[in-house]
Amino acid sequence: MVLVFLLGFFGFAGVPGVITRVTNHANGVPLAAGANIASNVGNALGAWLGGLAISAGLGYTAPLYAGAAIVLAGLAVMAISARLAPGQAPVTRRRAIRAASHRRSR
């Protein structure tokens, strides 16, 4: 029961941060849709690795650990990328609208 809770916790722990980061740095471009794509790739990767773990004979609890490892890897990538891009202010709604209207006027 505890592992099921941890699976749900770790399964959704990284998604808000990834979506927020992509949206803040998208500057009003449709790149923000990439956050949803990344989430879907993560879901597919988790299902695939979980299936591999079960088929390898590691038991039915092995996908829990595989999922937790994937999320921890994603959180590590997010933390490293945030560390490498210091001083970048998040895009405000006003800046995003201004950037989008500037691109349209070209």
Image (cartoon, rainbow, N blue to C red):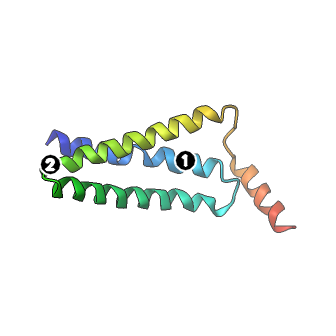
Q: Secondary structure at mark 2?
A: loop
Instruction: Estimate the x, y position of residue 91 in percent, counting from the top left.
Output: 69, 46
Is 86 situated above or below 102?
Answer: above
Is 23 on the left-hand or right-hand side of 48?
right
Choose the circle earlier in sequence order: 2 or 1.
1
Tell me which residue sits at (23%, 46%) in the image: 64
Tell me which residue sits at (25%, 41%) in the image: 6
Quarter of the figure with residue 34 = bottom right
* Identity of the residue furthest to the front in this view: 56
Q: Pointer 1: residues within 10 angstroms few (<14), some, or many (20+)?
A: some
Is 4 on the left-hand or right-hand side of 42?
left
Is 20 situated above or below 41?
Answer: above
Pick the front one: 46 or 94:
46
Instruction: Estimate the x, y position of residue 100 in percent, counting from the top left.
Output: 76, 61
Residue 80 tag number:
none
Is 98 situated above or below 20?
Answer: below
Quarter of the figure with residue 46 = bottom left
Tell me which residue sits at (78%, 56%) in the image: 99
Residue type beneath disc 2: Leu
Q: Secondary structure at mark 1?
A: helix
Pick the front one: 93 or 76:
76
Tell me which residue sits at (51%, 35%) in the image: 79
* Identity of the residue furthest to the right in this view: 106
Residue topped by disc 1: 20
Residue topped by disc 2: 58
Residue type beneath disc 1: Thr
Is 66 on the left-hand or right-hand side of 85?
left
Instruction: Estimate the x, y position of residue 59 in percent, counting from the top left.
Output: 12, 50
User: Gap in Å between the C-alphas at discs 2 and 1?
Assistant: 35 Å
